[in-house]
Image (tube, coloured by chain):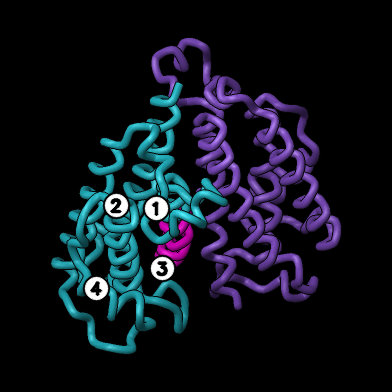
Chain colours: A purple, B cyan
Amino acid sequence: MDELFITTVVASWKQVINRLDEGMAPLSDEQLQKQVAPNKNRLFYLLGHLTAVHDRMLPLLGVGERLHPELDEAFITNPDRAIADPLSAAELKKAWAEVNAAVTSAVEGFSSEDWLKKHTAVSEEDFSKNPTRNRLAVFLSRTNHASFHSGQVVLAK
Amino acid sequence: MDELFITTVVASWKQVINRLDEGMAPLSDEQLQKQVAPNKNRLFYLLGHLTAVHDRMLPLLGVGERLHPELDEAFITNPDRAIADPLSAAELKKAWAEVNAAVTSAVEGFSSEDWLKKHTAVSEEDFSKNPTRNRLAVFLSRTNHASFHSGQVVLAK
């Protein structure tokens, strides 16, 4: 039973990531500069933001060091267009694929016990009071976050 | 272990619904007429669409008859502004709350076995080949769908 539960949860993440991939990967550098609505984020920014947030999942889930901490300043700390893009569209697409592959591979190795361990941003004390602050909660939250921005990406079409 | 897994999944759904509620409930009838971007869906349409889709979960999860099948024509079959709105904003907000309460209450009564039963839109034969076509998959998919439109709703601000 546990295994099927987990397979279903990971399949949901993969589906969201694949849809974003299908929307973003075919776009040219110029198309990625498009805003999702007037004066809203560019697709490029959203792709950078999602890459940085997913990269942060690696230490948050306790499965490894970050691959691209250099993305935070441009895509998390600052809003869109506040500073120059720190990498090209081709480099960003590569980082996006790398980070998602690392997260997916790590969670596919989780046992059911691993899923219910605390994530690293909650203290032992807080976790003992609220055991839903676990890795599964982080994973579902990030899946929803990716869906949230996916809904914006489609508006740029 | 099973129980904590399920609690975490249902908490994720509630969080997404609550954020949509917080965004939509305070809006006036006039504000609900706003489009999320030029020539895109109105907030009113998105609220109707989400209400109809969540209402469809009741038979799909095998937990009951639909409460508001009359919403499908305006909010699923047709795109926004194709036909006149079939209900007022106040009626729509009420239906939205009713439907989500019914879904949440039903899934809170699911055992782990219930979650992994087939949903009603898949045949026994297909389900035996692919047991991830279960109620949990429907629930995660609809949670992601709500997040997807939630990302659009915030653009109207």
Given this view, does label 4 or label 1 mark the residue nearer the observer? 1
Which is nearer the eye, B118 or A90?
B118
Given this view, does label 2 or label 3 mark the residue nearer the observer? 2
Neighbourhood count class around disc 1 (C-alpha, 10 Å): few under 14, some 14–19, many 20 upward: many
* Mark sitting earlier along the chain (4/1): 4
> On the picture, is A138 further left or further right than B109?
right
Q: Amino acid type of disc 4?
A: Leu
Q: Is residue A114 magenta?
A: no
Chain name for mark 2: B
Neighbourhood count class around disc 4 (C-alpha, 10 Å): few under 14, some 14–19, many 20 upward: many
Q: Amino acid type of disc 1?
A: His
Distance of mark 4 from mark 1, alpha carbons?
22 Å
Chain name for mark 1: B
Tell me the SS state at disc 1: loop
State yes or no: discs 1 and 3 in contact (Cβ < 8 Å).
no
Distance of mark 1 from mark 3, alpha carbons?
35 Å
Q: Give the number of the disc on residue A48.
A: none
User: Looking at the picture, do discs 2 and 3 lie on one chain?
Assistant: yes
State yes or no: discs 2 and 4 in contact (Cβ < 8 Å).
no
* Mark sitting earlier along the chain (2/1): 2
Q: Is residue A64 above or below residue B26?
A: above
Q: Which residue is mark 4?
A: B71
The span picked out in magenta is: B144-157
Q: Which residue is mark 3?
A: B156
Given this view, does label 1 or label 3 mark the residue nearer the observer? 1
Which residue is depicted at the point 28% across and 88% down? B83
State yes or no: discs 2 and 1 in contact (Cβ < 8 Å).
yes
Q: Which residue is mark 1?
A: B119
* Mark sitting earlier along the chain (2/3): 2
Distance of mark 2 from mark 1, alpha carbons?
7 Å
Image quarter of the N terminus of chain B = top left
